[in-house]
Amino acid sequence: MLKHPRDPAALPRLLLTLLAVALLWPGIQLAELDLGVLLAADSQSEMGRFVAAFWPPQHDREFLDLLLAATLQTLAIATAGMALALLVAVPAALLASRALSLSAASRGGRPGAFGQALRWPVRGLLIFLRSVPEIVWALLFVRAVGLGPTAGVLAIAITYAGMLGKVYAEIFESVDQRPMHALLQGGSGRLAAFVYGILPNAASELVSYTVYRWECAIRASVVMGFVGAGGLGQQIDLSLRMFAGGEVASMLLTFLLLVLLADGLSRLLRGRLA
Amino acid sequence: MSLRLTGAHLQHGNGVHALRGVDLAIAAGERVAIIGPSGAGKSSLLGLLASALQPSAGAVELLGADPWRLKARARQRLRTRIGLIHQAPPLPPRQRVVTAVLAGKLGQWSLGRSLLNLLYPSDIAGAREVLARLDLADKLFAQCQQLSGGQLQRVGIARVLYQAPELLLADEPVSAMDPVLADHTLSVLCRHAETHGATLVASLHAVELALAHFPRIVGVRDGQIAFDRPASEVNQALLDTLYANEQLVSPPLPTVTLNLQIPRC
Amino acid sequence: MSRLVNLALVAAIVLAVIASFAYLGLDLGALFGAGSLAHMGEYVVRFLQPDLSAGHLAAIGRGALETLAMSALGTLLAAALGLLLALPAAGRFGLLAQSVTRLLLNGLRAIPELVWAALMVLAAGLGPNAGTLALALHTAGVLGRLFAEALENTPKAPAEAIRLQGGSQLAAFCYGTLPNLFPQLLAYSLYRWENNIRMASVLGFVGAGGLGQMLYVSLSLFQEAQASTVILAMLVLVFAVDALSGWTRQRWVRA
């Protein structure tokens, strides 16, 4: 008669738990975690006083004008940045995408060695552009071209060129390739084959993703403002430094409203155009 | 009386009358099979008996208590003594068989033991013994998603056997098994009920299985009890009336009459 | 009619783009003109010789570990808080609790991590604690909403079966709902960890420790060689976390 079997999952679970505990302790030390600060929001603490200053939110005429100007600037940074990003992303995507590969057309979708080798640098560049966080680009541009919205526009342009380029290339590859291959094998030029073969199918997904990224760009613009790249973010940073709780509260509310509006507009555009 | 239904009506949310004026009394330790055409109300009847569904009219008495007059906590305690084998086993795909079976006693274990059981199964021997009765001992540590339909049903049965309730209810417990396996599994179920003195009520599609294993047969049709007889008294005529116009029965083939033309010379 | 509307929309978008450039007064000519490009080119060249001395690399190593700890702990705390908030947000405790929790979750995730970090620096002082808390709060909002959706889409039959045999609500959740839910929760948490490692690098800009703080300081002191090493370290960290997360996903989140 067999002894009753032991649970085979017991040992891996034990090891995993020990590993987790072994990593947790130094992790907490490194992160200097102290949840108490969140709970010590009594009037004595810095945080408590600051939160108390949030009410009432600043709403005098002069300030609201400033707020409006900053919001418009943020919107402008996001839109201009996206426009520049598209200028780079579209050609890069066309270059990087395997969808436009002549060799792939006759090999069932896989480009020849030469074709792959040519595309790798472009893909690599796109990945590099999007891997560095946009705020790092913003910081660099602020040092290079000075404080203000220019740095923000350039930072968005570069990062989003990478993001849009890579995703566009992937979208081109994800739609049915056969119309494209058929046109290429029929002797059509690459660009013409692309416009007739891939673009009709890919258009709605492209538009949808672009509008979604524009919405993200608005949020990114606000965040970049913290390092001096203009817009709402720069104003929030200034008010935080001056401990002007009322102003910060108004600006946060404006930001929430802006995000809501952008979300609504994005949904509308995606519904209509995609 | 182990369970008693008096004039029970059941109306589903969408207005469908599942049961109409059902009277049923089953003594402790009895073994009863419920048969009938699809859509007759067998599952609804078992749901009523398991206290999963509340009757829209009439009275339900389970193990001497009306579950719907009890407070929630008392009702939960009553439910630990009732076990329902579901037609589609409610087992999460990624759960292991051993945990699924041991979950049968969740109503009887303390909270601490229930949670600790998730980390390390607290009664592997017990689970193994129950699964061995159903020839599934080798699947003790397999995941539920790795089992076939028939194996999954047996795990569902194993869970209720492990629970060892006083009232065992089974909703089509062998529907996914081949005839030989179904027969064997029903024997196991009946043997368990006899050994533990539990009441067993099972709904079955296969009439032969019902007649072979259960001494009392209840026929249900259109939400009402058509007959309630000992198995020896159930004859073909009763069954024909019960299953008349059943959709699953194939329509009689139209007889083709050949008109022979015998040529006259 | 709808074609006309679509055309009008496209025209409006083009107008908006032109207006943006005009409003910002961006002089693209001056920006991309020869002098300006040369100036930027000089700036970039200073980055091309990263400082790889042992002392600096040690400091970067510590910064990287700090950033990693920030992102991992922040995501872990967020998952715990998110799961806790997901239960009322999915309607398990009634309509009022659902509305209040959803409002709270929306508020938490609408405010970007960097803004949270700036607020937390005020509350908790400079250092990685502020960063961890900021990530935890923002990600809790994101994960809470994702978890609530996953919870609503989980089949209810297993949990109901446990209730029917006398089990408590907690037992029904742990044995019936959680096994189905867990892979989804893990997938979402890993996805947010990949995002948080990028954000954690950056939160240092407002004083929340890690590689970000090192980058900000070295850029402010015009030490481009040191800064470029930090950027390289950030890239390596992102790559490593993406790989680890991918492996975990393969192992534990098989469909």
Image (tube, rainbow, N blue to C red):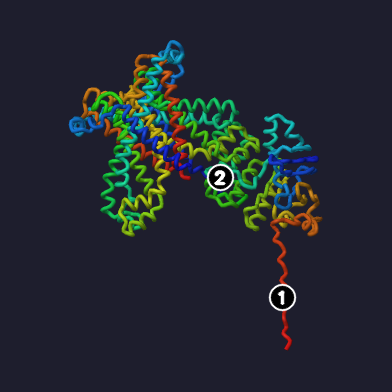
Q: Is residue B197 visible?
A: no
Discs 2 and 1 carry the same chain letter:
yes
Question: Mark 2 — on which chain does it sit?
Answer: B
Residue position for label 1: B258
**Amino acid type, callout 1:** Leu
Image spot of residue B219 (x, y percent): 77, 51
Q: Quadrant of the N terminus of chain B?
A: top right
The answer to whether B237 appears left or right of C201 in the picture is right
Q: CA distance from mark 2 to mark 1?
A: 60 Å
Indicate the quadrant containing the C terminus of chain B: top left, top right, bottom left or bottom right: bottom right
Residues B226 and A145: in front is A145
Residue at 77% across, 40% down: B8
Identify the residue shown where x is 39% and y is 55%: A179
> Mark 1 or mark 2, which is nearer the start of the sequence?
2
Q: Position of residue A1 (x, y in %)?
A: 56, 49
- Number of the front mark, 2 or 1: 1
Res C217 seen here: yes
Q: Which residue is mark 2?
A: B97
x and y, in percent, of residue B18 in the image = 73, 44
The subunit carrying tag 1 is B
